Image (cartoon, coloured by chain):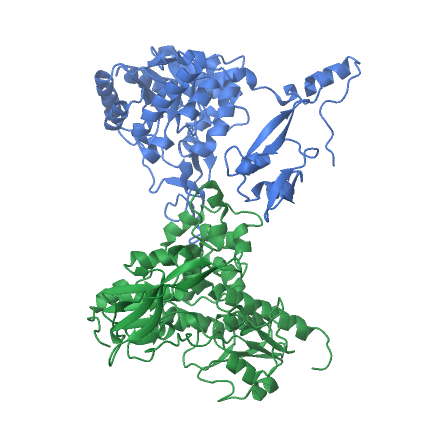
Chain colours: A green, B blue
Amino acid sequence: MKHVAPKLDDAVYERNFADINPRLPETAAVAEASRCLFCYDAPCIKACPTEIDIPSFIKKIVTGNLRGSARNILEANVLGHSCARVCPVEALCEGACVLNQEHKRPVMIGALQRVATDHVLDRGIRVLEAGAPNRRRVALIGAGPASFGCAAELARLGYACRIYEKRAVPGGLNTHGIAAYKTRASDSLREVELVRSLGVEIQDGVEVGRQVSLEQLRGESDALFLGIGLGATERLRLPGEDLPGVIDALGFIDRIKNEPFRRVDVGQTVVVIGAGNTSVDAATQAKRLGAENVLVVYRRGPEDVPAYHYEHELAKSDGVTYVYYAAPVRFLGQDALEALECLRTEVVADAAGGRSVKAVAGSEFHIPCDMAIVAVGQQKAVDWLTRMFPGVALDAGRLKVDGAGRTSLRGVYAGGDCVNGGKEVVNAVAEGKAAARAIDADLGQPRASA
Amino acid sequence: MADLSTDCGGIKSPNPFWVASGPPANTAYQVMRAFDAGWGGAVWKTIGEPIVNTSSRYGGVDLGNSRVMGFNNIELISDRPIEDNLREIAEVKKRWPRNAVVASLMVESKREVWHEIVKRTEDTGADGLELNFGCPHGMSERGMGSAVGQVPEYTKLIVSWVKEVARTPVLVKLTPNISDVTYIGAAAAEGGADGISLINTINSIMGIDLETLAPRPIVDGKSSHGGYCGPAVKPIALNMVSAVAKHPKIGIPISGIGGIATWQDAAEFVLLGASSVQVCTAIMHYGFRIVEDMVDGLANWMDDRGFATLADVRGKSLPRVTDWGELNLNFKVIAEIHREKCIGCHLCYVACEDGAHQSIRLVKTNGATAKVPEIIDEKCVGCNLCMLVCPVPGCITMETIETGRAAMSWRAYQEALGKGIACELPGERHPH
């Protein structure tokens, strides 16, 4: 890298990566919980993919029954703690709060959910129990939110679950792919332990198809669940992409979460390509690691930014500069990245009635930079899927499932990013949970010989 | 601006707001701070042979984000020597001649003891006396306070002893811990009382500490029943004030007490017949400063309504307090939900479904995904429940329905039947 940003004091790193939404003190939590109207048939529940009974868990905070509150949450969503930290609540439960209709601030549901789950996780209080063993076994591939949602639900029904994870550390994107100021890897690992406490076995560092065969999994289980997520960050396939200094967003975020902050080098000037939520995580964290200038290059204008509004605002308030209507053309540099060459773009109405991006010929300009972070989405795991499951139905690289997570192959279920193409943790948990219920329904009912 | 000055049984004050006999009126320092803040009068903390108090002594009941909706105490009368209290009363009176200073008294039930304390107290220049026949805890175990106020004969007897020597007006403070407060009120009037103060506190246990299993307020692991007061008791006090005010054998001025914290509360007590109002818990919660809005708000309300003096307001709502048998059974309201204000909490729906008459349904409206509540007019009995639980002001209103029937009370119906006049049963049968 040409210019590495100077390292910061450890205290400054800790300040920069401190919880963006600090824990609500318990007294403030009771006051906030008292604002909940205890709606009947509440809209917030319907807005939650895992259908947490929000009014009930909030009522229990008011009465000081935090253990019961946490049970309400975790029974519905075993990752209720990380969801409390990372859910886009404005778009989900808090956005549906009826107080919005009265032009009042919605109840801080996410913060309250964290108070309740912190209470039991901090103290090691057990609120979930495995069901009486039913001698059925399920193998799950990928130790992320979808498999956790599925395995927790199954374990509570009495199933023996074994999760295979190719990485050395389980937890999926919660452990590896979400900004450290939202949740640390250690928070994610606490939830991994919660899943394990239900008797779910997690085999780390075991890749299906390498260290263990699919046949073995099929032989040892009654059903198979795929929660494999997505693949590596998409490549731009532009000249100079292999220059030192050009990195992918997920690898960068993973290092920040799992290595000491000062060991992660960041350029003096950083360009982030793409403007989704992962781009925000990369840009804000580059800034927090000490980069002097962070620019986001995006082909469209501010109104089209795909990141959530509050994420976009966070990036701007962190001092990130957005370069709109610019498309990268190539990376320039001798031995290391020195600049990104872009073309100006226009957004024009196309024949199909949509708005497409058109590069303006001859509008080349250079953004000098030391580091470029590519954040233009993740690849679909098509290769692995078609190799392991020949003939499985896919839709644009995503596994095709029915409404309850059944793939086109009998006995094979799926949920999470490999199905939905990349949504929130809460969606993955909900899809895993739905698949668990499908598995239970299918295995529980008499059926033709499998 | 409206004239707020008042005369309660001969005790005059520039406004009707008096500090009630209790911890805020324990010393000259406090009473003078109160007068500085704008209080029209103060009833000194009850004077008698000094007692020893417990520690702790107060308990509170919270509701949601509101602290101290209810309050109780197991504190006794003044723990200060009689002479200190009397000297300070004289001092306050000298410095605040226009404000009412009333001395609350409680002594042994002996004629000469009462005679002596009345004379000594009146020598201070106090504007009147209030006989504490209401204190429900501690003192009652010693034959004083509510032990007197629960027996009409004792009440009448002691009031008559006091009146034998008193030169200033005598108010009698009544306990609500009886079956019918008017018996005691009438006894006090018969004994010669110049006015009645009510209510004193209500017997209560504030709760149990679920850690230690001790009742609250905790005194070395135990507690005793104490006197309950604060905003939670106001409706009980209003009922008792109106009962005394309407009673034909009482007919003397009333000083209203019980959960008063705002000018609206005060206006309600005056509308039901009070000539002054006394406040304690709200001061203990927020300090004497609350009187500023009480005075200002009451005067503004009176100006807006065209009431020139407090006497114009006094008792105005009394004729509207009647027996149930006088209520018009042919009057009908039903709920109306103003959909544009509905925020979709569905509390009205579940309240009616589970707690009332199943008269609300949830319906889908054109284009909307969420259901909205709708009143089933023919099933609605007009009970108010949905309006009461609705969190949005004005979203549910109760609308009068023309029944086309002449007014008919239960009593009128019974009378008509007695005279053999055939008439339709008033009201409507419940449709279920």
Left of A446 or right of it: where is A298? Answer: left
Task: Report the residue at 33% width, 42% height from top.
Answer: B55
Q: Quadrant of the N terminus of chain B?
A: top left
Residue in front for this viewpoint, A316 or B377: A316
**Count of numbered marks:** 0
Residue in front for this viewpoint, A366 or A373: A366
Q: Position of residue A113 (x, y in %)?
A: 44, 57
Left of A319 or right of it: where is B270? Answer: right
- Determine whether B407 is above or below A11 in the image: above
**Outermost front residue:** A362
Left of B17 or right of it: where is B272? Answer: right
Q: Quadrant of residue A155?
A: bottom right
Q: Position of residue B401 (x, y in %)?
A: 65, 25
Residue in front for this viewpoint, B153 or A130: A130
- Determine whether A141 is above or below A209 in the image: above
Q: Position of residue B346 (x, y in %)?
A: 57, 44
Q: Quadrant of residue B397?
A: top right
Q: Position of residue B357 (x, y in %)?
A: 67, 38
Q: Is residue B383 visible?
A: no
Residue in front for this viewpoint, B216 or A286: A286
Q: Is residue A227 visible?
A: yes
Q: Quadrant of the C terminus of chain B?
A: top right
Task: Report the residue at 49% width, 25% height from top.
Answer: B238
- Determine whether B135 is above or below A47 in the image: above
